[in-house]
Amino acid sequence: MHQPLNNPLFRPPAEADSLILQVDQGCPYNRCTFCGMYKSVPYQRRTLAEVRKLIAGEAHGAPDARRIFLADGDVMRRPFAELREILMMLGTHFPELTRVNLYATGSAIQAKTGEELRQLRELKLHTLYLGLESGDEETLRAMCKGETAAEMAAAGRLAQDCGLRISVMILLGLGGQARLQEHALATAVTLNLMQPRLLSALRVVPIPGTTLQAEVDSGKFTLVTERQVVEELRLIVQNLDLTNTVFRANHSSNIIPLEARLPRDRQRLLAQLDFLLASGHLDSRTPGELPLWL
């Protein structure tokens, strides 16, 4: 079996304590202009025989694992029959297993019927991490996302109607200075349609070797300033109408760590952002200091 080419493996922050099984390598789409996660990793979907061997080996070392994250990008893209088989293997080898989580795209979710999604849920598939990035269709096209906001919103609703949990990620600053307001307002509208149980906001950071970095270097894309990032997040929060969502902006790319339960903590969150905007500490001319890695 091939060893992982991308090491350490990418996984959401919430999966820090999960057993990570790399059933796939790379991303089947891998054309988003802002993403550098899998650029050097050719996509490979491991055979069920390879996956079975991987699971058996990991079960020997961690038989009491309760949470498992299936890597790499968009494992949900696998056919329903393969996903069902993998989940059944996990249930057999890990008797204490409570949930299995993975990255998913909207199109991969919509390729499954409602009945198929419900069957996967019964086999302990639990949380699907969906990168919405933006609700602004023009921004998504510019970033070669490959999916529309409307498609991703429909996919999120379908999954949640079938008992799965959706954790949605948005990228602050993805519209650049040219589409700051459009990106923020359309993202809020799409999130209101989707009603995700979990919502994470990260700041877009140009990664060396990506198309976005080249566009920043050439002047085609102008990064928002540190202050504008906070203004954009405030505009999104101000226009959210969520009924039961845990919100986090505690990634290393964020200006300050934030966490709230919406709608309960909406006014507190707005007050925190207003305090930050009034503090005089935000850079109004440049993006400020960006993390070296994500």
Image (cartoon, rainbow, N blue to C red):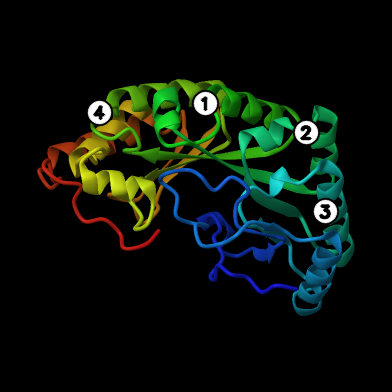
| Residue at mark 1 to residue at mark 2: CA–CA distance | 18 Å
In the image, farthest residue toward the bottom: 61
- State which tag comes first along the sequence, 4 or 3: 3
Q: Is residue 18 visible?
A: yes
Callouts 4 and 1 close, C-beta under 8 Å: no
What residue type is disc 1 on?
Answer: Ala
Q: Quadrant of residue 178?
A: top left
Residue 87: numbered disc? 3
Q: Which residue corresponds to mark 2?
A: 112
- State which tag comes first along the sequence, 1 or 2: 2
Question: Of the residues tagged 4 and 3, which is closer to the observer?
Answer: 4
What residue type is disc 3 on?
Answer: Leu
Asked if residue 120 lies left or right of residue 136, the reply is right
Helix, strand or loop under label 3: helix
- State which tag comes first along the sequence, 4 or 2: 2
Question: Of the residues tagged 1 and 3, which is closer to the observer?
Answer: 1
Q: Decide: few, some or many residues near mark 1? Use Cα within 10 Å; few <14, some 14-19, many ≥20.
A: many
Helix, strand or loop under label 1: helix
The residue sitting at 49% across, 57% down in the picture is 39
Q: Position of residue 171 (x, y in %)?
A: 40, 40
Q: Which residue corresponds to mark 1?
A: 149
Helix, strand or loop under label 2: loop
Q: Which residue corresponds to mark 4?
A: 178
What residue type is disc 2 on?
Answer: Lys
Residue 176: numbered disc? none
Q: Position of residue 177 (x, y in %)?
A: 23, 32
Q: Decide: few, some or many residues near mark 3? Use Cα within 10 Å; few <14, some 14-19, many ≥20.
A: some
